[in-house]
Amino acid sequence: MVPALSMAFMVLTLLFLIAAAIILPVFIRKKWETAISPYFIGYGVFFVFVLILEQLMHLAVLGAAGEALTGNMWLYALYGGLAAGIFEEAGRFLAMKLMMKKHHGKPHNALMYGAGHGCFEALMLVGLTMVNNLIYSAMINAGQAQVLVDAVPEEQKETMRTVISQLCDQPAYMWAMTGFERVTAIMLQISFSVLVWTAVVNKKTAFLPLAVFFHAFVDGVLVILQSSGVNYILLEAILFVLSLGIAAFVYHVWKKELHTAQEIGMGIGIDDNN
């Protein structure tokens, strides 16, 4: 049986993510009078560059390298980190340079884009997982666990048994921690967006590879900590501290570069209402 408290935390996490995806763009738009379109551009870039293009590369690379890559923790961390950093920051760069050109007059649109990128990631990676978990949990508690196992191909049956075991045995608070993990991720996505924005609008090109490096570093650390069996709460605490450090650095960049970006926007008379 899946504990009722576990299911309650799954529901609360799902509702939290949905609320964040609604409240965050509304807050940014009202506070800084930004455009709304960068938020949805962030959705589109994540979908194309992460869920399609990056996954296609993973299929090719992991299919060719196999155990030689996945069996080496350090090599796999390096590959995974660089793949995420390069694809996401390249998508961010192209979006800001080409699709958000008319919004360059207001730097706060970088925050709106980052919110969209981060919120869509949260909904796709965690929100949908919570929905699946709730469906599986309801079936398990209705005595239909074997139905779930029988419904998948033979090579996936052991994976399904593991999923069922985790749903039944994992401490309830772990499901709430996934919401906290997404707060860290959204903070990072906004930070990376500010760096790439600075590279695009202020012509400080060094900030683009810096965004790739920070992104790859955090994702690589995640892989290493997970592979090393680090306690989940400790893992999330470490990532949160790393993210705060990156956010503090980006805030310094923001304060230093904001005035220049505003001057650029005022100089070219950009309309920023859509």
Image (tube, grey):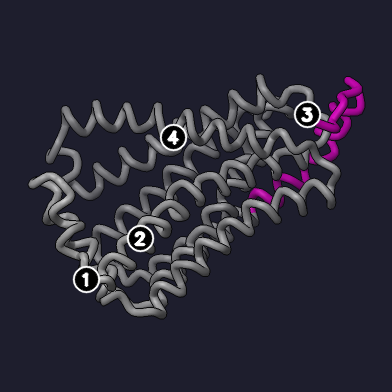
- Residue for badge 4: 50
Real-space Cα separation, disc 2 to disc 3, in angstroms? 44 Å
* Dot in front, 1 or 2: 1
- Residue for badge 3: 104
Amino acid type shown at disc 3: His
Q: Position of residue 108 (x, y in %)?
A: 77, 42
Q: Is residue 257 visible?
A: no
Q: Earlier in the sequence, mark 1 or mark 2?
A: 2
Residue 264 lies in the magenta-colored region: yes
Please report the residue visible at 87 percent of the width from the left and 26 percent of the height from the top: 271
For residue 268, above or below residue 35: above
Q: Are marks 4 and 3 in contact (CB under 8 Å)?
A: no
* Dot in front, 1 or 3: 1
Q: Return the residue nearer the eye: 22 or 29.
A: 22
Amino acid type shown at disc 4: Val
- Residue for badge 2: 135
